Amino acid sequence: MRNLLLFCLAMLLASCSTPTHRTIENPHIEMANSHILDIRHIELTDTATILSFEAFGGPGQPIKLNEKTYLEADGQRYAIRRIEGGEINKQMQLSQKGIHSFKAIFEPIPMNTKQFDFIEEAKGGYCIWGVDLTGKKKFARYPEGLPKELRGKKKDCPMPEPIFKTGESTLNIHLLGYRPEMGDEVEILIFELFRTSFNTKTKDEKIDSQIHTLSTKIFLEGTTQITIRLAHIDANVWVAPNEEIDIYMDMRATGSAIMSTRSKEFDVNKMYEFWHPQIPIAYTTGTYSEWNRLYNSVKNEIVRLNPLTNGYYGDYRLSSEQYVDYTKKMYRKLNDSIDRHPSLTPFEKRVSKLHNHLDLVYVAAGYRWIQSKNKMLVTKAFQHPNNYKDCTDEQMREMVKAFDFNDAKYCFFTEEVDDFIAVTIDLPKRLQLSEDNFYYGVRRTTQIKLLLESGKDISPEDKAWLEKANPYFKEVVDAKIEELRRIREAKLAVKSGIVPKTDAEKLFEEIIKPYKGKVVVVDFWNTWCLPCLSAIKKIEPLKSGELSSDDIVWLYLADESSPETAYNERIQNIKGEHFRLSAEQSKTIKRQFGIRAIPSYVLVDRDGEYALCNDLHNIEQMKKILKEKIK
């Protein structure tokens, strides 16, 4: 009897003891500062914690975890030990399919741990917060801090009417759940209806780290689409001119975006579709509050015709006649599939059809660009769009028959309308739009703005047209004239240097001559070059930090392809010496150094010797080289 009691007691103790092994599949993730890494599997043992990662991104993209990577649970840190499928402190590269699998092994965390944070301690290091080990965690319906009045329940609303007025609006952006490791700046993309630059207008705004908010003023040329970007998450909102709105961005969407990928196959040509949060990204007050909430709550990827978002469209071997037939069939097919789609909500169907309608014009007008892109994706060989024979005007009109160019309401989608108007030369003429047509007015007003920005006067013909056209277009032009006047009258803190008067072949030596005895970094850039601006943004803090030295001169060479107004504005925030060259001068100097793309860098040493030095593209290399040069 005694032995039986002892046996039962032993069994009871065994059943109550802590397990020595646990596995968790596809854990809930609360937030992250990047969508590149996903934790697909977790194994807890009494000797280690093993995280199985899937990494996604561009072909060959490098990823790295340093030795300061750790897990944090209940206030305790558990250090990384090793990586299987890579090495600590060494770069791992994604495959040509944009994927890499690896395991990270950490010190063992307690078996009864309910959640942990994954932290790579470094500027820009990967962070994943709130990794659940219970299998029970779900997102609360609304984020903490969201005002009750914004917790709308409507499931559908019609497309609002755009407001065709100009004016300054104030955006108060609240980042709910923000962590400093997500970044200290928010990128704001402004999709202007009358865009005059090749690139989308952007502005970066500092986040108040204490209250997790920021406020900014933006001049709008009517109702405008705006994207707020942080930690690889985009909140897309519409803003009316002359209003102040509050935008609440739910940073839990970062975790939701990662988890949304787990049942999908990754396609490097369709990355846009891969990450899609399943909780609302943003809520706003203002004119378009209800629309903004619903648009940012879309759970299913919007069905699109546009290859800018969906990768391929058609086949580069299609003749223009075949392309016309293909486009008409695809448009009908997509509309039918939207109607029959089993999981799209009424709102998602409405938005998909609106996008499909707008995309129809883009794929018709962008025939040559699309063919060029398709060929590059398939053959990896680039052929400039101008080398393709365009479809005829009659074929273009045949493709866009379904679009009503007499309805200006589609200008609510400022990004899409700007895309199809800008993708081909003289779209209104090719479509035979009359001078009183609204889309004709958008194109002509944009051309007038371009002339003004290049320093030219409005022609008598354009003045006459503005007087009889929709007053909105004159209001836009008048606003641009006033903006240019203010810029001219403003005392610029930084001015472009006077280009020496000499032969183009000798110009470079004349420009660097005053700086002999110093180390000169010559940066070839332009205002329209996104990689240039990105590099400048990364370098700028070094000038007052690690590379702060009177012995280093930062010299910037742009050319006339940078509009003077945009150039003068941009250089105010770039510390250094600036020169804006003529096209011929720029061409000659670039030829001297064999420069075919920008940004490019020439390094001049203290003795005046110089050479192309594109090692400076790498920030760490730049710091190492310059520190060595000024010793």
Image (cartoon, rainbow, N blue to C red):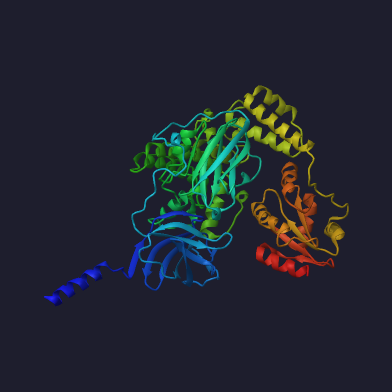
Image check: 271 left or right of 136?
Answer: right
The percent position of residue 408, horizontal first and vertical second, equals: 54, 29
The residue lying at 72 percent from left, 26 percent from top is 463
In this view, the residue in front, 383 or 491, is 491
Check the image and name the residue furthest to the left.
1
Check the image and name the residue furthest to the top.
468
The residue lying at 64 percent from left, 45 percent from top is 198
Q: Is residue 121 above or below residue 335?
A: below
Q: Is residue 591 above or below residue 364?
A: below
Viewport quadrant of the C terminus: bottom right
The percent position of residue 209, horizontal first and vertical second, equals: 58, 49
Check the image and name the residue furthest to the right.
501
The percent position of residue 146, horizontal first and vertical second, equals: 46, 40
Image check: 467 left or right of 50?
Answer: right
Viewport quadrant of the N terminus: bottom left
Image check: 274 left or right of 514?
Answer: left
The percent position of residue 289, horizontal first and vertical second, equals: 48, 34
In this view, the residue in front, 213 or 465, is 213
- Residue 401 appears in the picture as rendered: no
